[in-house]
Image (cartoon, rainbow, N blue to C red):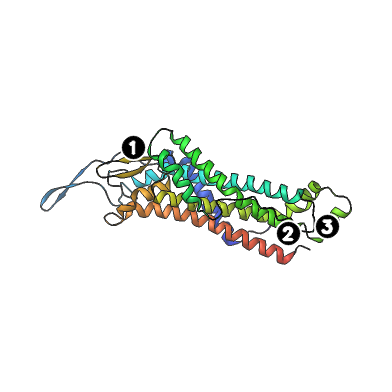
Amino acid sequence: MGKWNLKLKAGILLLIFFFILSLIGPYIAPYGVDELSDVQYVKTESGNKLIAPPYPPSENHLFGTDQWGYDILSLLLYGAKYTFFTVLICAFLRSIIGGAFGLYFAVSSRSFTGRKERKKIPNLLSGFPVFIFVYFVLIRLNFVPVLGENSLILLAGTLIVILGINGVYNVVFAKTAELKTNLYVLASQTIGGSRWHIAKTHILPALKGQLMIIFVNEVILVLHLIGQLGIFSIFLGGTFVRMDPVIYISMTKEWAGLIGQFRSAFYYSPWVILFPLAAYLLLLFSFYLILQGFVQKERVKHRKAPII
């Protein structure tokens, strides 16, 4: 695999941390997901003083509590698995399906010269933000709990995957078509190599690094999309609406949902939103480091052994 650069190492270490956290989060959470902190009486010089949530960070609540008394750290630990695994699975499926179609159509095209073979899948939504489409599909279902949490996550994930396949397809198709013009590929075809032998022996090994870059980039795009949905109260797994005043609550406690749920708390108890925001940004940063690490690794590889 070659020598890993510092960005790649740091990003993977952070990713391993989040992976472990997603697996064991509910087991190490200091409080239950539905456990409330009681109103406290504190002795002061003027007598007993009543203190109610939200509580700032303290020894009992490292990240503080929200306005109802729920422990922020516990909410993050319970919601980690929904954030982490949903993003990874959606990005993986987008990359696998789009990449497979791109490779298949590029390799199966007649020309091995790269001319007149740019076949794009028609995409009617190419100029239409994916966020808008997903938002209007989910806005009714998310606020009316007809479906369960897992069903809503599956529905949102399916939409995110389907709407992202075309972008991956076009990138892989273009890169495969470019590789087919290289001399070693043309030589293999000349001596009788079949298209799929050429794909397996020459194109896939050359695409391996690019496919990793595409996958990590898709992870970042999916994470951005989930964050945008969270700001508009479309939370993975469903949105519970509490009336008087109207408050939107994430059913699964996924991190983008917590950011959207607590966004109004910034002015009176900033820690309530800052810790979920920090967790989300740190996860995003870990994938950004991995992406930059793979890009840097590919540049070094091509400088040492450029493709003919």
Q: Mark 3 points at which residue?
A: 186
Residue 187 in picture, x, y percent from top left: 85, 57
Q: In which quarter of the image is residue 294?
A: bottom right
Look at the numbered disc 3 and give the secondary structure of its residue: helix
Can see residue 91?
yes
Q: Which residue is drawn at 61% across and 50% down?
A: 166
Look at the numbered disc 1 and give the secondary structure of its residue: loop
Q: Which of 182 and 202 is in front in this view?
A: 182
Drawn side of residue 221 relative to residue 211, left or right: left
Drawn side of residue 59 relative to residue 213, left or right: left
**Residue sitting farthest toward the right:** 191
Q: Mark 1 points at which residue?
A: 34
Can see residue 238?
no
- Cα distance in 3D space between marks 2 and 1: 55 Å
- Density class for disc 2 (Cα within 10 Å; few <14, some 14-19, many ≥20) is some
Residue 69 in picture, x, y percent from top left: 28, 43
- Density class for disc 1 (Cα within 10 Å; few <14, some 14-19, many ≥20) is few
Q: In which quarter of the image is residue 267?
A: bottom left
- Cα distance in 3D space between marks 1 and 3: 63 Å
Q: Give the residue type that dot 1 points to.
A: Asp
170 shown above or below 69: below
Q: Give the residue type that dot 3 points to.
A: Leu
Q: Name the residue under label 2.
A: 178
Residue 161 in picture, x, y percent from top left: 56, 45
Quadrant into which the N terminus falls? bottom right
- Cα distance in 3D space between marks 3 and 2: 12 Å
Nearer the observer, disc 1 or disc 3? 3
**Residue sitting farthest toward the left:** 46
Drawn side of residue 257 relative to residue 301, left or right: left
Mark 1 and mark 3 lie on one chain; the one further toward the N terminus is: 1
